[in-house]
């Protein structure tokens, strides 16, 4: 289920970028944000260790605009300071529920923005 939600979030990213760019750029942007979203835990740790405030604060602001896809790929990762795997009884329904709400929030936001941008687009 979490994998399906991840696919939906990435698809909504692709639809969002397709509403205002060319197909090639849409694919590049979507793939880039997919990669950033998958390594978000590592990037968050790197951002926290930066000493320069003038660099850390803007990067942290930009980092919040990228969906955290690490939430959906939990096998072999850390959740609430505990090593979890999908092969055990570690994934609770509460975690799946909050992950689903997180995905639905991204889906709704991206699809509404894509429809607003697409409405204003001039095809002439």
Image (cartoon, rainbow, N blue to C red):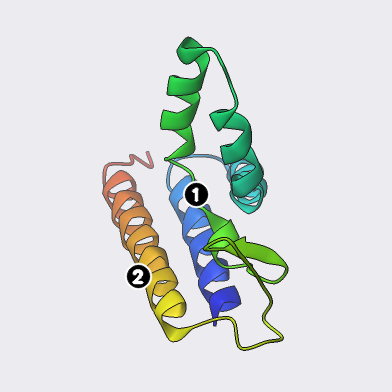
Q: CA distance from mark 2 to mark 1?
A: 24 Å
User: In the displayed structure, would residue 120 be above or below residue 34?
Assistant: above
Viewport quadrant of the N terminus: bottom right
Classify mark 2: helix, strand or loop. Answer: helix
Residue 110 locus on image (x, y percent): 37, 54
Q: Residue at x 52, y 15 (%)?
A: 55
User: In the displayed structure, would residue 54 be above or below residue 87?
Assistant: above
Q: Which residue is mark 2?
A: 101
Q: Residue at x 53, y 12 (%)?
A: 52
In the shown orientation, is residue 17 left or right of residue 108? Answer: right
> Are there few (<14), some (14-19), or many (20+) residues within 10 Å of tag 2?
few
Q: In the image, which is nearer the foreground, mark 2 or mark 1? A: 2
Residue 11 locus on image (x, y percent): 53, 63
Viewer-side residue, 14 vs 95: 95
Q: Residue at x 69, y 72 (%)?
A: 75
Can residue 108 be seen here? The reply is yes
User: In the displayed structure, would residue 75 be above or below residue 64?
Assistant: below
Q: Which residue is mark 1?
A: 18
Can residue 24 be seen here? The reply is no
């Amino acid at each position: 289920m979490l994998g399906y939600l991840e696919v939906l979030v990435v698809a909504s990213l692709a639809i969002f970028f397709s509403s205002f760019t060319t197909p090639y750029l849409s694919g590049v942007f979507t793939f880039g944000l997919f990669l950033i979203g998958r390594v978000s835990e590592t990037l968050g740790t790197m951002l926290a260790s930066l000493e320069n405030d003038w660099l850390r604060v803007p990067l942290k602001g930009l980092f919040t605009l990228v969906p955290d896809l690490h939430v959906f790929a939990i096998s072999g990762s850390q959740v609430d300071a505990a090593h979890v795997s999908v092969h055990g009884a570690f994934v609770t329904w509460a975690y799946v529920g909050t992950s689903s709400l997180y995905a639905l929030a991204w889906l709704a936001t991206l699809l509404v923005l894509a429809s607003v941008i697409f409405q204003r687009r001039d095809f002439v």
